[in-house]
Image: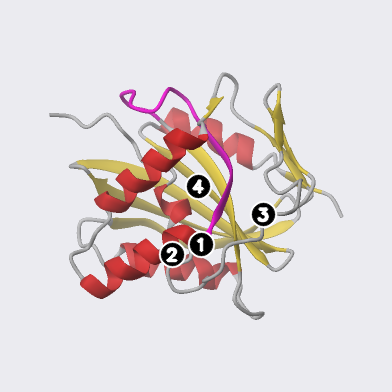
Amino acid sequence: MRISFVPAMLVVFLLSISVCHSAVAQSQNDIYGTLDKGKYVNNYLRFELTIPEGWTVVESEEQKAARQIGLDATKTGDVKTDAMIEKSVKADTTILFVSEKPLGSLENAAFGMSITALPSAGYTPKMLAETFKSIFLKNPKNSLTRDIVVENIGGQTWANVQMDLQLFGQIVHNNYFVTIIRDKALVANMSYQTSEQLRKMDASFRGIRFSK
């Protein structure tokens, strides 16, 4: 039976596996940003972008369900690694989560962003991407489709890695970006089934603009 649920925020939730250990304080009013008529604005991190036309916000209760399903699907069988992953799930703050179709739909796609506090100075986007890559390649069913590339997008230095993840017996294509801003890791994650879904998300993401 084909599994219809694509746990697209899975990688975002698991960013901080060995790098980040404390959740971002949520007292800032602007930390989650606002989405109006397809335009997302985050005054706390000072950036804006436009989401793909017709995509909708995934509500918090569905985010929680996606988090748990994704967590269950990524268990490696190694007790120590699985414990680290589970602990790290609590370390991030999701600021944006949108999907092409309602969660549970066939051939769905989703785009998410999250932030996580860094434990100390000195980390680079490439180091964070290497952490993500190394953790998910512990599962022999996952595969690297493009190794880490560092590039400038919207005036920020991002590290990007692309992987195919085996989840619930199906392949989920994943395009992962990470940068550092205001001493925090900012992650943008795209999970998709078709090249057209990727094209839409990539175009939206590359339209991101940061202000000083």
Q: Earlier in the sequence, mark 2 or mark 3?
A: 3
Q: Earlier in the sequence, mark 1 or mark 4?
A: 1
Residue 38's quadrant in the figure?
Answer: top right
Q: Tell me the kind of residue under disc 1.
A: Ala
Residues marked 1 and 4 touching at CB (< 8 Å): no
In the displayed structure, 147 sits above or below 59; it is below
Residue located beneath label 2 in the image: 88
Q: Is residue 196 left or right of residue 94?
A: left
Residue located beneath label 3 in the image: 26
Residue 53 at x, y percent in the picture: 60, 21
> Mark 1: which secondary structure?
helix
Q: How many residues crowd mark 1 within 10 Å: few (<14), some (14–19), many (20+)?
A: many
Distance (Cα) linking label 2 and label 3: 17 Å
Distance (Cα) linking label 1 and label 2: 5 Å
Distance (Cα) linking label 1 and label 4: 16 Å
Q: Quadrant of the N terminus?
A: top left
Distance (Cα) linking label 4 and label 3: 21 Å
Q: Quadrant of the C terminus?
A: bottom right
> Mark 4: which secondary structure?
strand
Residue located beneath label 4 in the image: 189
Mark identifier at residue 91: 1
Residues marked 4 and 2 touching at CB (< 8 Å): no
Residue 141's quadrant in the figure?
Answer: bottom left
Q: Is residue 113 magenta?
A: no
The region drawn magenta spans 91-108
Spot the residue most to the front.
27
In the displayed structure, 93 sits above or below 80; it is above
Q: Tell me the kind of residue under disc 2.
A: Ser
